[in-house]
Image (cartoon, grey):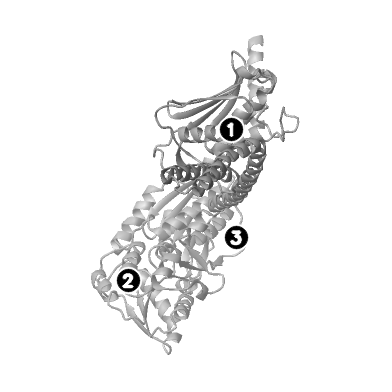
Amino acid sequence: MKPRAVLLIACTGIAMWIAGCLPVSAATRNILLLFDERVELPGLSLLDAELVRTLRSNSTEPIEVYREAMDLSRFSSNSYKTFLRDFLRAKYADKKIDVAVAVMAPAFDFLLAYGDLIFPGTPIVFCGLDRKQLGTRTLPPNVYGVLIKREFAPTLELALHLHPKTENVVVVSGTSEFDTELLAEAQREFRPYENRVSVTYLSELPLEQLLATLSRLRPRDIVLFTTLFQDGSGQPFVPHDVVEQISSMASVPVYGFLDQYLGRGIVGGSLYSSGAVGAETAKTALLLLTGVTPPQKLVEVFSNKIAFDWRQMQRWGISEYSLAPGSEIDFRELTVWQQYRWQIAFILAIVLAQGALIAVLLREHRRRQLAEVQSRQRMTELARVVRFSTAGELTASIAHEINQPLGAILANAETAVEILKSQSPDVAELKDIVNDILQDDRRASEVIRRMRSLLKKAPFELKNIDLNDLVRESVEFLSMLAIGRKVELVSVIKADALPILGDRIQLQQVILNLVVNGIDAMRGTPSGNRIISIRTSRVEEFAELSVSDRGPGIPEDRLKVIFEPFYTSKAGGMGMGLSIARTIIEAHNGLIWAKNRDHGGASFRIKLPISDSGAGPS
């Protein structure tokens, strides 16, 4: 044998061995679903979806699903069923169906009659029938069923509980074969209630007439809806759509028996689910697909749940607290709190935090205001103390200024006495003497008035004043002190008024303090060079005042601290004069600062905002 042939045989053997070791691919299982009506009908659609989902999620093999709809509510003749038999037989002649599922009684009857002909040897599973519909029929060995337990009485019981004053129950149904079967079962269950309420059955009316009748029901009526695939005129309908029209037109609450009606206008009821039937049917089919014989030929499913539509409860004034325990409420319209609970809680937390912060800030603001008021009061008291101190320094000059008019008054009075002793007093001269006495008296009174004004206790009060007038008054007040200290006061007052908003007494105290400090600073200055210059001017929207001396000036390292409390260069000083001056000026929204002059001495400058209202009477 040639080497090439040997190699070919070896490769073929290895390939066959590998192929034998690989798992055989899973075969696709074919399932046929035969529906008595169109699959898109809501109840059948729910059953179909749950059946297929359960099949595919629990099968280890691929599953191919075929669907056939008999559509018997629209095509129900015997010839049609014969044609359908032959059609399905031809259609699936070359397709092996592993399990056939009959959905609802008509489909089950059809497969019992023709199943062996169409799908020979194929297991059949039926669903959607109750025991009464199954009757006494004997099931062939390959037929299994999932029975449903339909109950109509529980819904009627619920409705009567929620509407205890009900007098008449209106049962709405259709005329199709399926409608008639369900209505017959409902009638059997409702007979025990006929001694409590009257029961009216509406099934033979055309839909339009039926809706008109339902719109005129009395307040103590209720409506129970079963199914309506065909109305009294033979017109086919979809119950899912009909129940919506009935619920909107009826003048009383409507109750139902199928979960698919919930959300379509019924209030609620004891509802059975098509989806649960589909899931149980799929479990039986899966056993047959795997070659396992189901333990029971028949499985009965009771999937009813008590459920209500929140919107319809609100429409008919039904309280949630009147429902039976365990009732479900769907379509609940959540409150804003229920929908946005966490967001609202978060916002409320922020608002509360902000509120607490604002409360703290307001409290602190109030405390600060009180502190400012107290501080201003303390400052006013301290300023008054400083004024007394300043007055102490002015005592000699004030005494001298008062003594002058008093001395003149005395001299004039003595002269008047002498004149009066003569035989013919000079009346004209006496008049001049009296006028001089009055003038000197006014002069003394003015000195005392200025002194009292300086020393009186008055609250901080802003008024319209002219800075020029204030400076003139202060210079006049200090003139005697300047003469006593051999100091020349030079004032350069701006011709135009400088209206400001201020407290006359406190601003005058600042001027007096600056002038007295300047006089004290020039104690070592030769008498001929002791000059205090006081100037006023206007710079833009500000009135400026400068008080300059020709003393030794201020050390450069002290310029920034001279306005600090308790700083003083005087041996017996308190160190509060300039600090109080700064506080007063800042209270007037102004500025005060000091600098050394180029040719010796110091200069204090004050800047105060011009008042728009102009100077008025103080």
Residue 84: percent from the left, percent from the top? 34, 56
Query: Compared with residue 501, is residue 164 higher up or lower down, i.e. above or below?
Result: below
- Disc 2 packing (10 Å; few <14; some 14–19; many ≥20): many
Q: Which residue is under mark 3?
A: 294
Secondary structure at badge 2 equals: loop
The quarter holding residue 564 reads top right
User: Given the current orientation, which residue lies at the most extreme right position?
Assistant: 571
Residue 86 at x, y percent in the picture: 34, 54
Residue 116 visible? The answer is: no
Disc 2 target residue: 174
Q: Is residue 556 left or right of residue 343?
A: right
Name the N-terminal-most of marks 1 and 3: 3
The disc at residue 47 is: none
User: Relative to the observer, which residue lies in front, 219 or 6?
Assistant: 219
- Expressed as whole percent of the image width and height from the top left, the position of residue 39 reads 39, 55
Q: CA distance from mark 1 to mark 2?
A: 124 Å
- The local secondary structure at tag 1 comes to helix
In the rendered structure, are the residues bearing label 2 and label 3 in contact, judged by CB atoms less than 8 Å apart? no
Q: Quadrant of the C terminus?
A: top left
Give 330 or 553, whichever is nearer the viewer: 553
> Is the residue 303 above or below the residue 251 in the image?
above
Secondary element under disc 3, as helix, strand or loop, is loop
Cα gap from disc 1 to disc 3, whole angstroms:
130 Å
Residue type indicated by callout 3? Pro
Q: What is the CA distance from the residue labelled 2 to the residue labelled 3?
A: 36 Å
